[in-house]
Image: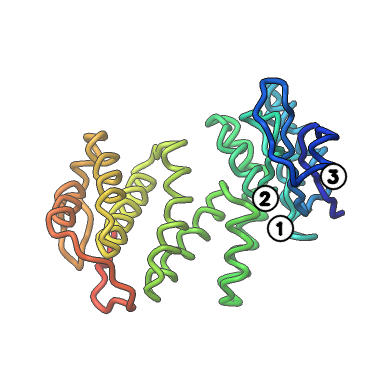
Amino acid sequence: MRKTILFATLLSAVQFLFLDAPLSRGADEKFIFVNTAIVNEDERISEQIARADALAAGGDWLAAIEIYQKSVDAALLQDPHYMCPARGEADPWVERYELVVDYCRAKLLGMDAATLAAYRGRFESSAQRALAQALHDRKTSLLEAVARRYCFTRSGLEASRLLAELAFERGDLERAWAEYEAVLEAWLRWPPKTYGEKNEYASLLARMAEVFSLLGDGRRLDRIAGIVSADGELSARNIMVNGEGVGLKQHINRLRAALKPARKESPESFATFGG
């Protein structure tokens, strides 16, 4: 369902009839602000998202995640550009909207570790099957669907990582950064626990540092350095860079010291990382 939203303040009849007359700025004057926008919204999806928000706010996250997932599924099936009201900062003059998929992803970031485990227990098997199909068919569009639909399952995060690697290899560094950032956001929200997870996390940070180095983006490279420096175990962890073992913090500091300008061509000498 598509609907038109009209935003307007109260109108002064005199001003409306005599628009060519100069407008004074008296204390009691009402100004005309009219803005019309087409919002691609399915009200049924927006309503069920509102129910999920209420359940999450009341602590019933298990019910909420079912509805958030149902909303994402419906949006991706019908129209990935469906939007819903963006709740949060109230503005009496403007009604803000955002993509259903982005909104639900942001809300799911509010899950605690126990709820995350329940979410993965509920949706991981479906995500695994979808990822296996995407890899079998070698279709980027299917990888994107897994990453968007099952964003915080292990398979969904692996799909985002693979999308980042594909973008990295073809030299699309900004796209690579966006996909890596989606994975990093999850690690920052739910820190790695196992040895294998910590290796994955270290490799991700090393790869992101390489991306920012190639982009010549010192600010974002410094952010990665800060994340590493704040974790003593992570700082000391060794990674493999071009077949050579090196400390993660040491590697990132080398990149910071030799910051390169942005390169748009597909690099032939990208470092390869391993835990």
Q: Amino acid at mark 1?
A: His
Q: Distance between the Cα atoms at labels 3 and 1?
A: 14 Å
Relative height, residue 74 to residue 129 (above, below): above
Relative height, residue 11 to residue 26 (above, below): below
Q: Residue at x 22, y 34 (%)?
A: 232
Q: Amino acid at mark 3?
A: Glu
Q: Distance between the Cα atoms at labels 2 and 1?
A: 6 Å
Q: How is the image coloured?
A: rainbow
Q: Residues within 10 Å of mark 1 (few under 14, many from 20)?
A: some
Name the side, left or right, on which 73 lies relative to 209: right
Q: Which residue is mark 3?
A: 43
Residue 29: % across, % down: 72, 26
Q: Residue at x 41, y 70 (%)?
A: 172
Of helix, strand and loop, which one carries label 2?
A: strand
Q: Which residue is mark 1?
A: 81
Q: Which residue is mark 2?
A: 99
Q: Residue at x 30, y 63 (%)?
A: 215
Which label's residue is closer to the chain start, 2 or 3? 3
Pick whichever, 104 or 27, lies toward us. 27
The image quadrant where one finds the C terminus is bottom left
Of helix, strand and loop, which one carries label 3?
A: helix
Q: Amino acid at mark 2?
A: Leu
Which label's residue is closer to the chain start, 2 or 1? 1
